[in-house]
Amino acid sequence: MKRSERHRLKENQLSHALSEAGSRLAEQQRTYGTVAAIIVVVVLIAGGYWAWHTRKENRAQVALSGALMVVQSPVEAAKPDASGKVAQSPGTYPTVNARAEAALQKFVQVAEEYPRTNAGIAARYYAAAALAMLGRSAEAAARFQEVVDRAGPTNFYGRMAQLGAVEAQVQAKQYDQAIAKAQALANASDDSLPRDATLMELGRAYAAAGKKTEAKQTFDKVVAEFPDSAFAEEAKGALANL
């Protein structure tokens, strides 16, 4: 092969190699460009979702604050106004129950409008507590269970709702269900709920059900295992009343 032909062959090989490399580079650039575009879109979507979620949580917190203000409103009897007409002063309620009813409506509204927010979970818990205070125990137990289902057993309101559900079931005279739930909480292997608190709930459930022997054994455990607990004194009082 002549030298000139070998030179042209090398040039052709080099040209082909450069062309192939250029094609690969262009393909990689398109791929990387597509990936970069996807990343930008994901970031924008995530940022938009975060901003939307933050705004929604803020609105929920404002609504929850309004509901909590109702709970703190004064309770006072209606008074005569300047014309002598008896009327309820703005921002007050004639009875504790009337105030609780008004707060309940607010809490339910927040819970239903913002179900996935922290404020919505809190509102659902407070609605359950209001129902229990109003003597609507079966509804309260169901609401407390909703809190646990939505928030999880390790969430603050989820933990409190588990205890609230036991108390509501006791109020509703659903003693077997209350005892079973309290036993499960007291025997749980995790530390999501203090054992002295769960034992105290179990003792109350036993006592309400008329099971004095089981109640005594449970209250004795509270006193023996948690002598420095705030529940120890309450357990001693419960033992004295059995």
Image (tube, helix red, strand yellow):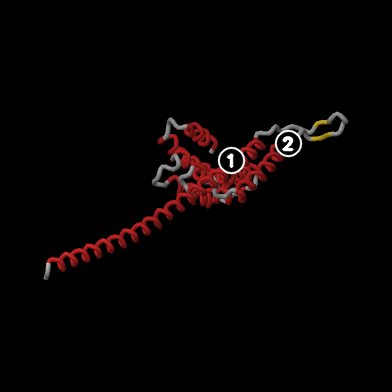
Q: Secondary structure at mark 2?
A: loop
The amino acid type found where label 2 is placed reads Tyr
Between 73 and 27, the one lying in front of the other is: 27
Q: Position of residue 209 (x, y in %)?
A: 55, 47
The disc placed on residue 31 is none
Expressed as whole percent of the image width and height from the top left, the position of residue 47 reads 49, 47
The residue at 52%/33% (across/down) is 237
Amino acid at dot 1: Gln
From mark 1 to mark 2, how far is it between C-alphas? Answer: 24 Å
In x, y percent, where is residue 236?
49, 33
For label 2, the crowd category at 10 Å Cα-Cα, with few meaning under 14, some 14 to 19 and many 20 or more, is many
Taking the view exactly as shown, the residue that stands out farthest to the bottom is: 1
The tally of labels here is 2
Q: Quadrant of residue 119?
A: top right
Residue that appears at 46% across and 53% down: 41
Q: Height in image: 170 above or below 229?
A: below
Q: Nearer the viewer, residue 100 or 91?
A: 91
Residue named by callout 1:
61
Q: Earlier in the sequence, mark 1 or mark 2?
A: 1
Q: Is 203 positioned to the left or the right of 27 in the image?
A: right
Q: Identify which residue, 14 or 111, lies in the foreground.
A: 14
Determine the residue positioned at 40% across, 45% down: 190
Image x and y of residue 76, in percent = 74, 32
Q: Which quadrant is home to the N terminus?
A: bottom left
Q: Mark number for residue 93?
A: 2
- Assess disc 1: are there few (<14), some (14-19) or many (≥20) residues with their C-alpha within 10 Å of its C-alpha: many
Tag in front: 1 or 2 = 1
